[in-house]
Every structure is written in C-alpha cells, then in structure tokens.
Image (cartoon, coloured by chain):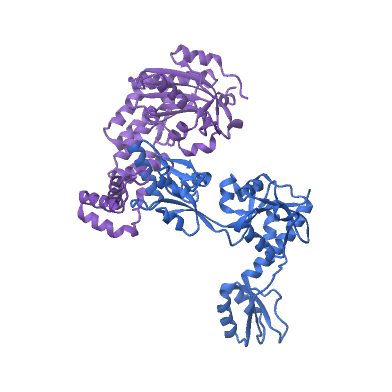
Amino acid sequence: MSGLVLAIPSKGRLQENVQAFFARAGLTFVQAGGSRDYRGAIADVPDVEIAYLSASDIAGQLASGAVHLGVTGEDLVRETIPDADLRVKLLQPLGFGYANVVVAAPKAWIDVSTMSDLDDVAEDMRRRHGRRLRVATKYVNLTRGFFAWKKTGEGRNGPGVSNYRIVESVGATEGAPAAGSADVIVDITTTGATLAANGLRVLDDGVILRSQAQLVASLAAEWSPAARSAARTILTRIAAEVRARSVREIRAVIDGRVERLIVDLGARFDARAPFGPPAPGTPLVLHAPKRSVFDLVEALSAAGAGAVTVSTLEDVFESSPALVEDLFGALGG
Amino acid sequence: MSRPLPQALIDRFEAAGFARVDLPVLQPAEPFLDVMGEELRQRMFLTFDAAGRELCLRPDFTIPTALLHLARGEAGRAASYSYAGPVFRHGANGGEVAQIGVESFGRPDRLAAETEVLGLALEAAATLGLRTPEIRLGDRALVEAAVNAVDAPASLRRRIKREIAFGGSLDCLASKAKGDAEHAGLFAALEAAGPETARGVIEDVLSLAGITTVAGRTPAEIAERFIERSAARSAVVSPAQRQALKTFLAIDAPAPQASARIRALLGASEAADAFDQRIAAFAAAGLPVDAMRFSAGTGQGFDYYDGLVFELARPDGGEALGGGGRYDGLLKALGAEQPAPGVGFALWPDRFEETSR
C-alpha cells in the first residue's frame, strides 16, 4: 500500500498510554480482528495502517524506512540508530515513558562520584589486576559514545573512561555488580529505587540521556502523496491537542485600545491573542502557557480589567503548526 | 577487491628473516577489544560462534601475529614474522583493505631492531612507488618522561597521560577538581588522622557494612584510592610546569633539530638520551634522518605502542600510508608473564596506488 504506516508499541502500559494520547487528539485506533491482530487503522483517517511492534523494533523500522511514523523511547532511537539525526526526526515528546539512561557504580565505592573517578579506577584495575573495568549494559552504543574522550568544542568536553569493557547483559542489568559479572552498569532508571536496592548509585555526571516516549518520523521511508496527506492530518490533530493542553484561554474586557497591551503580554508571558484585538466592548481572548496564567491575570487586572475568566480548551488548531512544519521541513519537497 | 599484493615485497620480507605467517581471517574478538579498547567495536565486523563466543574478521594483523608467537613458545624468545592480506574494518573501502607488514619480537638489541624495521618499511614504500615519503616520528616514552617530570601526585600524572593519549583537553592541569560534598566530613577527619589510620578506618567502615569485595575491588583498594584522591584534589600543577609540558607537547621539528628542544625541557634524561641514540643509529644506517620530522603528538592514541612511533605519508602530507613502532607491552597485555620487546610496521598498499605515478 502506498499510504502511511504508523508503528505503535504492541503491549503494556506504553501501548495504553499511546492509545490514550492519540485518542485525546481525536485519533481512534481500530483493530480489525480484535486485539490479537497486529495490524490496525485509524477511524476516519484514510490511508493509514497501524503496525503493532515491540518498541525496539519500531526504532529499527523507522531507521530502515519500513514505517513512516512511530512511537518509541528516545533511548531506543539513540541506541539502535547510528547517526539518528540523519535518519529520523523526533517530532513530539509525549509526556510519558520517562526513563534516564545512567552510569551507576556500587555505593561502597566511596572514592567514585564522577566519570573522571571512574576513569581513574579503570586504570587502577588494569594496573592491579590486568583487566578492564567491566560495564554491564544493554545500551552498548550509548555507553561507547558517552565513555569516549571528547575534545574541546565537541559537546561535553572532558574526560572519558578508557580502560573499560562492555559486558552485554540480557537480563537484569542492575544485578550484575552484586553477582560479580560486572563492576558498574549503564541502564535505565525512573525512580532510582531499583538501583538503590542493588547497592548502586548514579554518578554525579553520569546521566547519559533523559528519555521519554517520542513520536518519531522516518526520513528514509517512501513518503508518497497519500502518506504525506495522512501524516498532515494526524500531526495537525496532535498539534491541536498538544497546544490545547499546554495553554489556558483567558478572557477579559479591557476598556480602550489593547494593541500595546497584547504586544506587552506576549513579551512578558508568551501570551497570544489568536483572534486579534477585540471589537469595543467585547472580551479580549488570550492563550497563554499554563504556568503563567496567574501572573497574566494580575497584569490584566492592573491594566484595568474587570472580571477575568480562565478555561481549558479541547483543541487549538493553528494555521501552520510547528509539528507539521518540522516534518515537512525535514522531508523536503 | 584490491589488487593482488606485490609478491616482490612478500619475498623480500621472507629473505630478510621475517617468516611468512598465514593467519585465519576469523579471530576471537576478545583480545582486540581488550588491547585496543571498546572504541574499536563499532569498526569491527563481529559475529558469534555456536557457543556464544564473540568472533571478528581480523581488524589488524599485529594481535593475531602476537598470539601466534605466544602459542608457539616462550614469549621472550626472538622471532620475526611477516604477513600480507586483507583486514576488515567498517568504513574503509567497503570494509576490506589490504595490509602488509612485519613484526619482530624478543630482540634485545633495541636500536638495531628499530633501525632495521624502519629501513625495511622505507624500502617497501619505495617498492610500492613512494621513494621520498614524509617520515613522521613520535615517541611515547618521551611523552611518558615529560609527564613524569611534572611535580604532581601519581594519580594526577596518570590522568594527564590519558588526557594526552585520548586527545583530551588537558583541563585537569588548570583547575582543581571540585570537592566531594557528600563525603566532605569524612575527608576532613581522615586527613587529620593521617594516611595509615585513615586506611584502617575506611576498611573498618566498609567491613562493618558487610562489604568484602565490591564488584572486583577490595575495601583496601577503595580505601587507598579514597585517600589518594583527597591528596590529588588539593594538588595544583604550577603554571611554569604546566607551560613546560604544553611546550613539550607542541614540539614539531625536523628530527635532527628536535633533540635540543627535547633536552631544553627534559634535561639529561634516559628518554632524551634514547631519542638521540636512535637518531644517530638511523643516520649511521644511512636512513634519511633529514627527511624525518619529530612531533610529540605523533602516535598519541595508537593503541598499544609504547616507544618509537613512525608514520609514512606523501611528501605533501595527508593520511598515513603506513606506520609502525615499538610495543613492548603488547605480549604481556595478551597474557605473557613478562613484557617482551616488540617492533613492527604495516603498510596499506592500496593507499599507495593513488600516490604512484
């Protein structure tokens, strides 16, 4: 088919969260043959096929271009896809699936709090025992990138860790140091509780990546007109929902001219007047980020507003949402 | 596929006493990763055997040759080998590139061995069409000596060496490491108690907590480094010494003139003497020392080299067409009981093709 393939995690909380996220944007997944079927569609959006895949497969399929859009963790994107930024585009963080990829060492190593300490210990081990520091991880590529020495001006500037070896772990990575099969680990953590339970702690400068679930576009896929059109529909709805969720609508009647006030509030609170200045006697309508609502209300009162109402919005469709522009900008043409 | 390797060279190496070895293409990955580091992994072609052992297509010949040398007998015995064939690394030429070279282990006559190997490399380069290459010299032992001359705790000196080897910024020279707030109280108490008491206290604390060996480190090791670190943290390299080291690392001069500049910084030292003797030996053997350029930076980041390092390139510069040097630590790193001398070089014949008219 020449339409769009959207890859969705095939199980667990991640799938539920993704489904809920899309549903909020008015995109309802329909599964043809019940929940055992690994293909589906989106009600009322034509030319879309949903592929239910494991989160790590999704990263690979985005890289190869077998799917157009997909939802997966940034950690898997960065780990699975070499030169990820050339092959995929991270379009939208989804606000769930949070996990940090971190370097953790045994708590009892009281002499180790930074990567620089780890580097020193690694050499110490090599000298004393003739072996390298063993790092247990599933994140081989992220580890290698993070442990590499960086030259000035190459992003993070500073020491790497030289005398190490990766021990690929398939099971519970955090148990490897206690089991004696590794010295330190690189793994994902959400609360740190599992690390603490295994007598490990994250190094001060040991956070490799702060990851969450992302909506990702493949730059390698065959983007037919039908696929582009379907993507535009999906992303427009998502952008409207994301924008609606991040802002509040504020209404107030202001006497006199408000053009200067709109510019001022835009600069101070990132507030926008989506419908422009109001007709005399009608309320000014503003959209502003959630966090600046109360400051904005105060400013409006100071400007002579009477009653001010604040409400949440269902959807905010903007004329060319950044999300859509980002994708088509990256695809070119 | 590259052109067939020049038989004349293979014969020449054999005639010079470097026995031809045939090495399997498929090699255990472990020794390569262990000696050359995890960074190599992304450039190797890796696979597994049925037992789950990691194998690779040989990314170079030196390590398999060294392993063969170890398998055939006493590590320290004198033996010389030559090889020719493809090596495999991601990127270059579709992943397969021809290499030809020699290794010589166990020779106690260090200068003669280095002279012979460099001479043979130059002769081979000429056979491949490059008669007057640029010859870049480096010396890892000199860099080692220059860092050892810095008045700083041993751990800081080791850090400086790694910064140099891995192309770090040398920032560690300029600034004091930030204090460790978490254990600041413990630090202060231990510093007042003196090192011996301190070590005992830390060992006691760890063993009270039921900790015997933690991920391959004993409480004694942890204690020792904890104390060492506190000493290193308060240490600062003087501006004069910092400048001296930077000046040394910036040396880039024709080999015959480099000596004076090395001595200006190192004074009378074994490593500086060794450098002079080597240049004299090269000159006595008729090697073109005037065409050699010494730069302190040459060979930094070369995985297992620990003394002389040389590279051959076109006279107008550009990437190396071959290189070699000394690696006395290699056999020990691969399992030998003691270090044993090792010198050798390798050339990439395909890179010469673009050069020769």
> Which residue is nearer to you in this view: B258 or A237?
A237
Relative horizontal placement of residue A167, taking residue A261 as reference (left or right): left
- Where residue A23 sits, quadrant-wise, is bottom right
Which percent across, then down, holds residue B146?
A: 32, 38
- Where residue A288 sits, quadrant-wise, is bottom right
> Which residue is nearer to you in this view: A109 or B158?
A109
> Which residue is nearer to you in this view: B7 or A248?
A248
Which percent across, then down, holds residue B89?
A: 55, 32
Which percent across, then down, holds residue B96?
A: 58, 28
Query: Could one spot residue B195 in this view of the protein?
Result: yes
- Where residue B164 sits, quadrant-wise, is top left
> According to the rendering, which colour does chain B have?
purple
B244 to A36, vertically: above or below? above
Q: Residue at x 44, y 16 (%)?
A: B18
Query: Could one spot residue B318 in this view of the protein?
Result: no
Which percent across, then down, holds residue A152?
A: 46, 48
Give the number of marks: 0
Q: Residue at x 63, y 87 (%)?
A: A307
Residue sitting farthest toward the top: B15
> According to the rendering, which colour does chain A have?
blue
B80 to B309, vertically: above or below? above
